[in-house]
Image: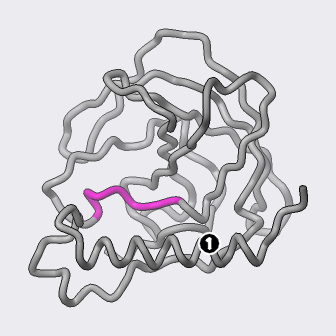
Amino acid sequence: MEFDTDAWRTELRSYRDQKDEQFAESRQSPLPPDERAEFDGLDYFEPDPDYRVEATVETVDSDETVTMETSTEGEQLYHRATRLSFEVPDASGEATEATLVAYQRVDHDGGSLFVPFRDKTTGQQTYPGGRYMELHHDGNLEDGAEVPLDFNLAYSPFCAYSDAYECPLPPRENWLEIAIPAGERYEG
């Protein structure tokens, strides 16, 4: 089935509008209450279908625990669930191979995996602590499976908006050596 770019853009814009509404109005908003009235929406890179990629799954068969440092100098424990291999455009537009690890929090089960990452936009156009994505899946991910990984959905953690949150920082193995100009931007 061919990818419908127009439907994807419409869905992405709707998702972003809903997120902006939640930030402005929800009691669970990471924005301090006194900042919500002035909030006029998050800043995003323009939607770019080149940063919605198909990633190949490589399952990780290990009980090794990964300790992620957090924004508050604490630690959170995760397991490596899968490695995701994919190609994304580099600064010249050429396809570059990259890999990210998707994690499962030690004390959580569920149908999504956590994909924290840093790239060459980190600390310049995006949050200095890195950005996150969620990989939603049904059942077990099998070796060789292809899954969509959409960097246009990359977001800043809540600690970017309030010191009241503790956010895991992407481990070194998820630091990309290329720029990913997609998803949320950060104005600091």
- Where disc 1 sits, the SS reads helix
- Please name the residue shown 48% across and 74% down the image: 16
Residue 138 in the image: state x and y as whole percent.
Answer: 61, 34
- State the image quarter where residue 159 is shown: bottom left
Residue 101 in the image: state x and y as whole percent.
Answer: 58, 33
Query: Disc 1 marks which residue?
Result: 11
Position above or below: 98 against 15:
above
- Please name the residue shown 19% across and 52% down the image: 165
In front here: 113 or 22? 22
Numbered-mark total: 1
**Which of the image's four quarters has the C terminus?**
bottom left
Q: Is residue 44 left or right of residue 56?
A: left
Q: Does the magenta stretch include residue 54?
A: no
Magenta span covers which residues?
Answer: 154-160
- State the image quarter where residue 90 is shown: bottom right
Residue 118 in the image: state x and y as whole percent.
Answer: 51, 51
Position above or below: 185 against 156:
below
